[in-house]
Amino acid sequence: MGKEIKLDELQLKVMNALWELGEASVGEVQTVLEEERSLALTTVATVLQRLHKRGVVSYRKQGRQYIYQAAISKDQTRKSMTRRLVDQLFAGKSSILVNQLLEEDKFDAAELEALKQLIKDAEKRKKKDSLK
Amino acid sequence: MGKEIKLDELQLKVMNALWELGEASVGEVQTVLEEERSLALTTVATVLQRLHKRGVVSYRKQGRQYIYQAAISKDQTRKSMTRRLVDQLFAGKSSILVNQLLEEDKFDAAELEALKQLIKDAEKRKKKDSLK
DNA sequence: CTTTAACTACTACAAATGTAGTATTTTAAA
DNA sequence: TTTAAAATACTACATTTGTAGTAGTTAAAG
């Protein structure tokens, strides 16, 4: 599933609300977004409709209400959008990105520890693969 | 300098060309971009003009030609756009992003080795800081 | 000198996104 | 019963981005 996913700020906020709630009506999404700043209900509705048109969300009817849910996973989205950023700005090299984050001191001690472990795991996988 | 930088695909391609060349005329930028696909010279000119309006590029006049150069560094751009992605999709946690990349097996053995070293460096910095 | 190429200024269109008001209908509350 | 709230359908506007043609001028090539 190499489908490109490109979502702008508000679209992502809406998706985050759906991922969090599992499914939601326009009003419920609005409520979540409103914690940050107020938006007209119709703005939220429009975003959802357009996302639906793109196949990014789906809905079922409940009475006269549309109950929306994400049609793409958060994981897929993360992968797709990270890939794009790495391709566009890091010459396709994830290591440059991670280097930058480490240099910027973006991790606490526990996270560094966890990363070390993940690197070990990755190295093990690499060794296993190279023996095949 | 916490200035938000948001550049879309073509804008980034133009910036990459400027960063690579140091400075360039519209025609020179077009030549670089053309390696991938052809674009009207006026399209490139328009993008550069709009970027200039935003303060993202600057130019000097040479005869009747504009010689553009980037007014923001690649590093700044990388930091800003990575921050946005992490905030929007990774709840502000860079470690989740790196976890994902490691799980996706995006690094070769040498890169993993280099990352280990960077983590050690980061850990040392952490310890130094905690002793202050 | 003439023709061609290069370059900017100007103009315009389409698509996508964010924003939200109005009209209508249905449902819930007073 | 009436009023208010909720929800969708419809509509419209502004901004941004990508796309590129036309006109006019200047510089380079033939």
Image (cartoon, coloured by chain):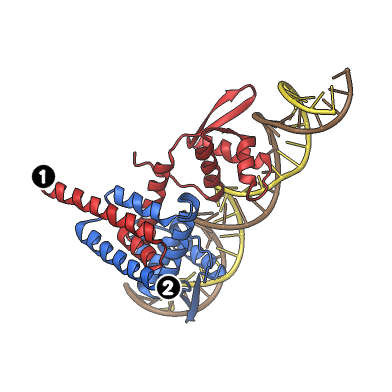
Chain colours: A blue, B red, C brown, D yellow
Question: Could you tell me which secondary element the residue under label 2 belongs to?
Answer: strand
Q: Which residue is mark 1?
A: B132
Could you say which is closer to the camera, residue D5 or residue B64? B64
Asked if one can make out residue A27 in the rendered structure from this viewpoint, the answer is no
Quadrant of res A70: bottom left
Amino acid carrying label 1: it is: Lys
The residue depicted at 67 percent of the width and 39 percent of the height is B42
State whether residue B27 is above or below residue B65: below
The residue depicted at 60 percent of the width and 39 percent of the height is B29
Could you say which is closer to the camera, residue C2 or residue A22? C2
The subunit carrying tag 1 is B
Please provide percent x and percent y for residue B84: 39, 52
Please provide percent x and percent y for residue A119: 31, 64
Amino acid carrying label 2: it is: Ser
The subunit carrying tag 2 is A
Q: Which residue is mark 2?
A: A25
Asked if one can make out residue B68 in the rendered structure from this viewpoint, the answer is yes
Q: Is residue D12 left or right of residue B124?
A: right
Please provide percent x and percent y for residue A33: 37, 62
Q: Is residue A31 left or right of residue B130?
A: right
Do callouts 2 and 1 mark residues in contact (Cβ within 8 Å)?
A: no
State whether residue A102 is above or below residue B97: above
Q: Residues within 10 Å of mark 2 (few under 14, many from 20)?
A: many
Question: Could you tell me which secondary element the residue under label 1 belongs to?
Answer: loop
Tell me the quarter of the image containing the N terminus of chain B.
top left
Tell me the quarter of the image containing the C terminus of chain B.
top left
Which residue is outermost to the bottom? A63
Which residue is outermost to the front? A131
Q: Residues within 10 Å of mark 1 (few under 14, many from 20)?
A: few
Could you say which is closer to the camera, residue A33 or residue B22? B22
